[in-house]
Amino acid sequence: MKYSLLIAVFLALHSAAEAQTTEAKKVARPVPAFPTLPEAAMQPTATVTRAPGNPAGPRFQYQLLKIQNGQIAILAPAWRGLTMLKPERIQKSLWTEIVPGSLDDKVMHTLNELTAEGWELLEVYNLSQPVGAQQSIETSLAFNDPNRPVYSGTTSITTYTETRYLLRRPLP
């Protein structure tokens, strides 16, 4: 007896909730669409800054320091046994977090040591390549008219960034 009463109440509540959602679907207004992103938003940008070079003269040895997305720096060829520079991390309760500026500190320290050893900066190359875009629309009710919602849209573009420093020194 108790179970049949519970089932009857459940069915009544379910049908009432379903009626409300179908009514809400009829009243719901269409969400405005985003305009498409312009082509220029997804184009890569690269800048190269070159130091004045001496085309004629001794042969040179080259060293490359490449920073990828601010997460890791790669040295090619290895310098003093180092091939990678990684930022310092601190342990938070369940995850690790990168210490802000720690990779920049290591890169600048390495560049200063290379310069002290006689390496000269030949070229700085910066690349910013968009790899994806995400658009979202948020709805909020206006305080003076709840039947006319306010839509606000945001677009976030994810980019891959790379900076390369090319250094050289004359061969002995």
Image (tube, grey):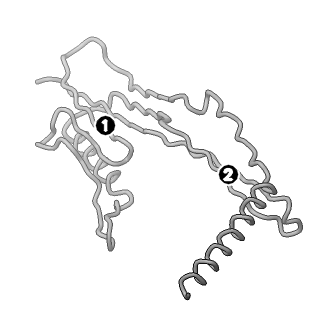
Kind of residue at badge 1:
Lys
Name of the residue lying farthest toward the right: 144
Judging depth in this view, the residue of 135 and 1 nearest the camera is: 1
What residue is shown at x 55% (from left), y 88% (from top)?
2
- Return the residue nearer the eye: 115 or 109: 109
Q: Which quadrant is the N terminus positioned in?
A: bottom right
Q: Which label belongs to residue 66? A: 1
Instruction: Identify the residue at the far top of this view.
Output: 56
Label 2 – label 1 distance at C-alpha: 37 Å
> Helix, strand, or loop for circle 1?
strand
Front residue (pair 147, 10): 10
**In the image, is residue 42 above or below residue 72?**
above
Is residue 87 shown left or right of residue 19? left
Residue 37 in the image, given as x and y percentages of width and height? 64, 34
Q: Is residue 138 left or right of residue 1?
A: right
Instruction: Please give the label number shown on residue 137.
Output: 2
